[in-house]
Amino acid sequence: MIFPKHPVLSCTETRQLEARLFAGDEAREWPAMERAGRALAEAVQRDFEEIAGLPATARILVLAGKGHNGGDALLATQALLKKFPSARAEVCLVFGERALRPLAIRAYRQLVHAAPGRVAVVGQVADLASAYDLSLDGIFGFQFRPPVDAVVAALLARVNALPVRLRAAVDLPSGLGDGEQKDLSAVFRADFTYATGVVKMPVVDSSRAEVVGRLRYLNLGFFDDVPVESRLNVLTPSILAPLAALRAPDSDKRDYGHVFVLGGSRSYPGAVLMTVLAALRSGAGLVTAFVPESLAAAFAARAPEAMWVGWPETPEGGLALEGRHLLLSRLERASALVIGPGLGQEAETLALVKNVVELSPVPLLLDADALQRDIVRAGKAPRVLTPHRGEFMRILAGGDFREFQKASGAVVVLKGRLTAITHDEKGFYSPFGGPVLARGGSGDLLAGIIGTQLAQTPGDPLLAACRGTVWHGLAADLLARAHGQVAVQTTQLLEFLPSALRCAE
């Protein structure tokens, strides 16, 4: 898999990178700060769309420390006030104006000059208003070492308790640092953390999720000329660029993969249909679905583009062993095989699945009830596993993750707040998607999207997993911005797959 590297670094590694990039030269640092401020303002505006957008009369609270994070927040505020002429900002210079470093004071004075009469200075905790639309946290940067002092802790406690529609941390929430940190009581509690230029280790640590909120990576081009190798990387929309390009004019449906889907039961009929719809919508040339025979006719009416094969059923409505020949006799036509959505956990059905996995010569995606410890280790075909945390713990069964991954040879897509894709000591984070995905069927759509990518890149299951995960997450972001997080249906995500491709950098 080859695509641009955007490493996740420790705070120490980030300090070393910035020394290489800027060598303490403010003439080089200022343009980077300006880029960060613009990118931050644009990102906040986009994310505000999930809750109907930043109001034209927005009230913004800016918490500015001494250095670059404070400067980023101040420049972002300047961009927001320019975009919203009726908005106002209150700036809390946490350590006082005299403590500001040269670039931060430059950003502060530029803000005041650009928006005369619309910027007020808040001197004490008692001066804070009762509510704000946006709070921008730029007190501490990645060089901070916990704990915070009592004055700053009191300020953070007050701000955390205020009604604020969206809380945004610049780079990482103030009060958070490198290393183990069990006490998070004196940390800014962000809805979004906007990593400027580099994603730092503390914000991908699941134990800090309650204060980090949702992660956004603002790519400032730091790695364009200074490549950095890292075991962990963050994914960007650029991974979708090949999908957004023109297809060859003489291409044929067989050029875009034949996805087989095995799943469904009378108890869970909808899941497999959603997977098939996602495979069709994400560009598969051909899709063949093997489902209980009682469901095939209705599904064919719903998605006639797919080929539906009715499968003999167990008395409980699952896939029976006797239908095995239906799949195996056709398997040479498949480019990838997706197994699991809506499958159920009948012993006979799981025995069937294990046998198919053992015999399959084509790449596999195993999801949902197919994520059983003995099944995911069976056979030799390349495979992608897409568990949520509960399923992950089930297949791990208390064992060591690295040993499990080595034994299974699998690419693992661990779904969650920050979806992680791992394989062979490599890890990738997808900072896309959000609470709009916290509904039944989201994983079934992901299985279909990754399954299509697996069929189109059969020699690179890691690329397929990364590309499919990013596409799914970006579409979810666009869905939430268009309709909010609450009053939507899972399958509406498919309507935003085309727009998500246009996000490719």
Image (cartoon, rainbow, N blue to C red):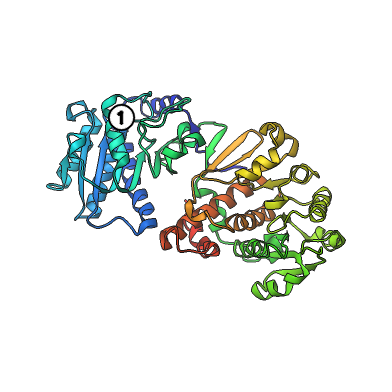
Q: Residue furthest front?
A: 316
Going by the numbered disc 1, the residue's amino acid type is Ala
| Of 108 and 242, the residue lying toward us | 108
What residue is disc 1 on?
153
Q: How many marks?
A: 1
Q: Is residue 460 visible?
A: no
| Of 226 and 89, the residue lying toward us | 89
Q: Position of residue 366 (x, y in %)?
A: 70, 50
- Give the residue at x 23% y 55%: 84
Q: Position of residue 33 (x, y in %)?
A: 31, 37
- Give the residue at x 64% y 46%: 387
Q: Quadrant of residue 172?
A: top left
499 relative position to 369: left or right: left
| Of 169 and 395, the residue lying toward us | 395
> Could you tell me which quadrant the N terminus lies in?
top right
Q: Quadrant of residue 197?
A: top left
Rendered view: 308 above or below 180:
below
Secondary-structure class at tag 1: helix
Q: Is residue 105 visible?
A: yes
Q: Position of residue 242 (x, y in %)?
A: 57, 54
Q: Position of residue 422 (x, y in %)?
A: 62, 39
180 relative position to 399: left or right: left
115 relative position to 474: left or right: left
- Give the residue at x 51% y 58%: 501
* Label 1 Cα neighbours within 10 Å, binned few <14 / some 14-19 / many ≥20: some
Q: Quadrant of residue 125?
A: top left
Rendered view: 302 above or below 356:
below
